[in-house]
Structures are given as C-alpha cells and as structure tokens.
Amino acid sequence: MPSPPIEIKPLERPFDITFPDVEKGIPPIPGSKSLTNRALLLAALAEGASTLTGVLFSDDTRVMMQALKDLGFTLDIDEGSHTVTVHGQGGIIPAKEAKLHLGNAGTAMRFLTAACCLGEPGSVYELDGIPRMRERPIGELVEPLRQLGANIEYLGEVGYPPLRIHGGIKGGEVKVHNTLSSQYISAMMMIGPLCPNGLTLDLGRHITSHPYVNLTAAAMEDFWVPGAFFNLNTHRVTIKPKQYSARLNYAIEPDASNASYFYAAAAATLGASVCIRELHWNSYQGDTKIAQVFRDMGASIEEGNDDDRFISVCHADALHPPSADFQDMNDIPDAAMTIATLAVLANGPTTIRNVGNWRVKETDRMAAMQAELTKLGATVEVNGDDITINPPASGKITPAAIDTYDDHRMAMAFTVIGLAQPGVTINDPDCVNKTFPDFFKYLDYLRQTAID
C-alpha cells in the first residue's frame, strides 16, 4: 500500500546549517549507498573481519546485508552506531545454494549476479526481485559473464531477472561496449581478482557514468587489491588475480547524491547556506561534481582541505540554467534529477544531456520527469537522451500532487521545488526508504536553523 501523501511546506526564512553539528543536535548526512553496498560485498569477499562505519541503513543496503547472510556470510550489525562487521571468507561463498530476493535494489542485483559466479562448482543460486526489477535489463552483464565461463540461466524473459546461477567462472578478457549502466562494469571488476585467469575489460570509447567505475576501483584498492588499472587512453581495465584483505576500520562517506537536495535547497533560498562535512572534491563519489553545477547556475561554493574536509553551497541571487559546459550529466545521472527539478525555478530553459540511462532506473525517469514537471506548469521536451525544461512563464508553479513511481529520487528531487514555492504534494513519500529513510525528518533541521 502506498504511504499517505505529504504536503511540502515552503521554507519561510533562510537557513544556515552544517551536517553534522553536534552542539545543535544535527546528525550527519547518511552514508553513501554506492559505497555501502560495494564495501559490504568486498568485505565479504576479503580474508578476515572488516568493520564498516558510517554505514547507510536503507531498503537497498538491508537487501544487500540480508542477501549476504543468505549466502552464508556472518554480519554483526549495530544499526544504532551505523556499524557493520563483516566476516569475510577469502573469496569463498559459504552457502552452496540460496534464493535471493533483491527487491528493486539495482546494485544488489548486479553486484550479486557477478559475485554468485564465484560459487564452487555444483552450487546454485537464484536471484529475483519485485516486478519492476524484472523489467530492468541485465543481459549486458550476463552475456560477458558467460563469455568469462559463468553458467547463468534466465528463468523468465531473456535479458531480465530472475536468474539461476551455477557456481564457477574462469575470467579472461571480454568486450563490454556502450553499456546502459556502469554497475555492470563494477560488478565484473569486483570479482575480477578472484577469477583464476584474472580479468581484462575492453570498454570501448564510451563509458556510462564512469565516475562509478573509478569509485569501484578505489574501493577495491581500499581492500588491498591495487591491481585494477583503468587506462583512460585505451579504455581498458586490467585486474590480476589477488586476494582481498580485511579492513579493520573502513569509514563510509556521506551520500553525495542525497546531499544534492540540501545543496539545491540552499541554492534556491535567498540568504541560505548548507555545509556538509566529509564531502570533498577528491571524494570517490562523482556526484560531488553537482556542487560545480550549482556554482555554474549562480550559487556560491566553498570547499575545505585535507585537514578540514567539507563542501558548502550558498544561495544564488538568481538561478540561471547551466551553461553548455555543464549540460552533459552522463557522469552524474542521479544528481542530474536534482538539477531537472531546480530548473523549474531557473530564469530560462535548462537542457540536461546524455541521461538516457534514466530509462532503466527504479522507474523510467525520463518519462516520469516529463510527466511530473509538466504538472507543475513547466514545458518539457525530450529529444533522444536529452531533456529540456522550460519553467512556467509566470515564475510560479501550478500546484500539483507529484506521483513518485516507487522511486526515491523522484520524491526527494521534487521536494526541492516544494521548499521554494507552495503547492507541491509528494505521493507515497515512504519510497525514500530505499536510500534515505529519514529524509523528510531532515527537512525539519533546515527550519530549526532558520536565520533572520
């Protein structure tokens, strides 16, 4: 059953907030989903026990934790302290058979499809999810895994979950060109060191969301596998056989995608400012780049250094569309949704380019964005993988109830508009539980730090 709708109340005064602020009782922005799910899997594949701190607890990460348990791994979970200790098994999957229900968690489905190929010969694993997951393509991962020696069956429509995976994979070299999702590449990279023949990926000339590939390589190095060499000139990833090793204390950064909503609220609110600690330009997360897009749209940006890491965003006197240099958002497709909604408040048409992979996310985000932005009075044009948003001529939105399509980012992105202008209601707001269960509670911190 969908959760009851929430009317978003506009912010009446500007705010000045830092996440976290212990003295004011303001918590940190929750940990990165991308890093949490990568770290959970890498820790399970490592030799020894790893303790992860700053762990995100949300629908997607709980799905990953439960799946690892179903595969026979031991996890010591302390949700109150956002800590998980994972007892790695040195590349061995303890359970010889398991049925994994992965909801609509794309990272879990893709990462575990590859990881289950590491099972011993004779082991069998079935992976499935909710009906939407059965509409999300996975053939671009299954086919190269088969070429690397994996035995994978489709249990329904070819190219889509559910899957049955028989343990055993050799590795080697494979071409992975023009993929819809960087998660396919990341999934293969993470199992590469544990393939007997290692792994070489020929990625072609175009890499979707390549910062996430870099993030995966960096996370692998954090678990003591420095053999993932990403050559930008040849677009090849070469990984030699090697064993992952445990990390005694692995800190997970705040989620840069989720931070974008608070940065956007500051950019759109005269006199407002948001500072988020432990985010920085050299972050593993490509979505920190969105702060540069906000600056291009007229906001002010400040950054810390290695000794005092933070990124802050202050209001824009007038929001204008991003320049041509910042319109290609293929590297930051999740954060690009925040720009799409902020565009309704800009003083001209905003074009966002190269986000065709929106169509294979939790919902078809291209169609969903067009439908819901149109409700608010914007004129929206989709041209291939590009979308152009013309704000309402009056400068005022048309009040509307926003359908969220069981997509957390639809709910959070459209909330930004409601913080700036009256008339936004979010349907089924509990869909934010996928990555940010307390999102709507965090809006209260903006009101608590209001300034005159």
Image (spheres, rainbow, N blue to C red):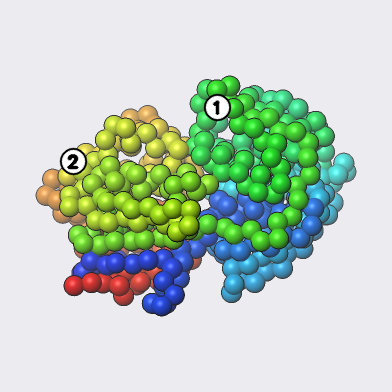
Q: Residue at x 55, y 51 (%)?
A: 34
Which residue is nearer to you in this view: 144 or 86? 86
x and y percent of residue 128 in the render?
Answer: 66, 49
Q: Amino acid at mark 2?
A: Gly
Residue extending farthest to the front is 307
State how far apart marks 2 and 1 are (Cα).
36 Å
Residue depicted at x 79% and y 57%: 48
Q: Position of residue 415 (x, y in %)?
A: 33, 59
Badge 1, how many Cα within 10 Å: few under 14, some, many 20+?
A: few
The residue nearer to you, when weighing 402 against 81, is 81
Q: Which residue is mark 1?
A: 232
| Residue furthest right in the image | 122
* Residue named by callout 2: 348
Q: Is residue 62 above or below residue 140?
A: below
SS for callout 2: loop
Residue at 67% across / 69% down in the picture?
Answer: 77
Report whether 197 appears left or right of 214: right
Q: Position of residue 352 (x, y in %)?
A: 33, 37
Q: Secondary structure at mark 1?
A: loop
Q: Quadrant of residue 101?
A: bottom right
Residue appearing at x 66%, y 61% in the figure: 249
Locate residue 113 relative to residue 91 in the image: left or right: left
On residue 366, which mark appears?
A: none
Please tell me in which quadrant of the rendered image residue 175 appears: top right
For label 2, the crowd category at 10 Å Cα-Cα, with few meaning under 14, some 14 to 19 and many 20 or more, is: some
Q: In the rendered view, does 209 fall on the left or right side of 353?
A: right
Label 1 amino acid? Leu
Could you say which is closer to the camera, residue 84 or residue 374?
84
